[in-house]
Image (cartoon, helix red, strand yellow):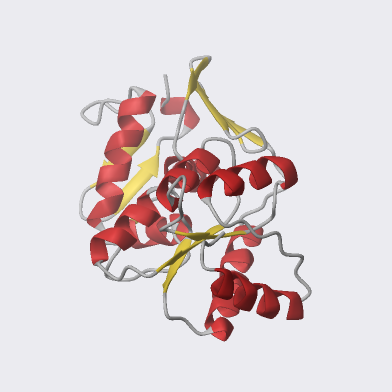
Amino acid sequence: MDDDHKVVSLVELYLKREGVRVIAAHDGAQALELFDRHRPDFIILDLLLPEIDGISVCQRIRQTSLVPILMLTAKVEEMDKIVGLQAGADDYISKPFSPRELVARVRAVLRRTRADDRSVSQLARGSLVMDFDRFEVFVDGREVRLTAIEFKLLRMPMESPGRVFTRDQLLAAIYAFNEAVVMERAIDAHIGKLREKLADDPAQPRFIQTIRGMGYKLLKPERVG
């Protein structure tokens, strides 16, 4: 999804060499239309799209899907990268870029996301329930709307209640890579928003407990509720 036809043609050429079927869009509105129609397995998304910008497209896709998204951008400022990742992108690459690097990034993101694909479609820990197929979370029977990042962040401890996860481990769970641009303390902000949505008081946690100096863990079911 890019408004530069030369870039689209180049990306399409290299991906087709890898046996990938490519569907191209040249503006944000068309990108959303094609996404709804075809439900692709991977998205390469330009930040600066006409009609609807790439950040807005990413956010709207993330309302219903965890499809891997690689953000493609001519902007190199750190804040632009952070905004893209916070919108739900799994990785980013800046223009000008090497087509071979782009293909390598696509492969890396797919390896990680496919490794995350479990046969289990739903997990319940006490009154906290996650449905992976439907991208839904429930607390005490009440649906809680999470962002893609919050959903990924909650999934890892849900699969291993009682285990302590460091900030680095949680970063690796929600992003395809770990650079200085994505700082460890960003996890604290995401956890704070997640707790707020789960109505989880950090002083008397029902679900997520802070392990000072280490990271976070999900309380075991017997201590929930």
**Count of number-bearing discs:** 0
Q: Is residue 165 left or right of residue 161?
A: left
Q: Is residue 220 left or right of residue 8?
A: left
Residue at 58% x, 85% y: name it: 100
Residue at 53% x, 52% y: name it: 27
Which quadrant holds residue 11? bottom right
Which quadrant holds residue 80? bottom left
Residue that protrudes farthest toward the top in the picture: 141
- Judge by depth and name the residue closer to the eye, 35 or 64: 35
Residue 155 coordinates in the image, percent (x, y): 51, 43
Which quadrant holds residue 162? top left
Q: Is residue 121 left or right of residue 48?
A: right
Residue at 39% x, 31% y: name it: 207
Residue 200 coordinates in the image, percent (x, y): 32, 26
Q: Kindly tell me whether residue 30 is visible in this rendering.
A: yes
Q: Kindly tell me whether residue 66 is visible in this rendering.
A: no
Residue 22 coordinates in the image, percent (x, y): 72, 64
- Judge by depth and name the residue closer to the eye, 139 or 60: 60
Q: Is residue 124 above or below residue 108?
A: above
- Judge by depth and name the residue closer to the eye, 191 or 48: 48
Q: Quadrant of the C terminus?
A: top left
Residue 46 coordinates in the image, percent (x, y): 47, 61
Q: Is residue 100 above or below residue 130?
A: below
Q: Quadrant of the N terminus?
A: bottom right
Residue at 56% x, 66% y: name it: 109
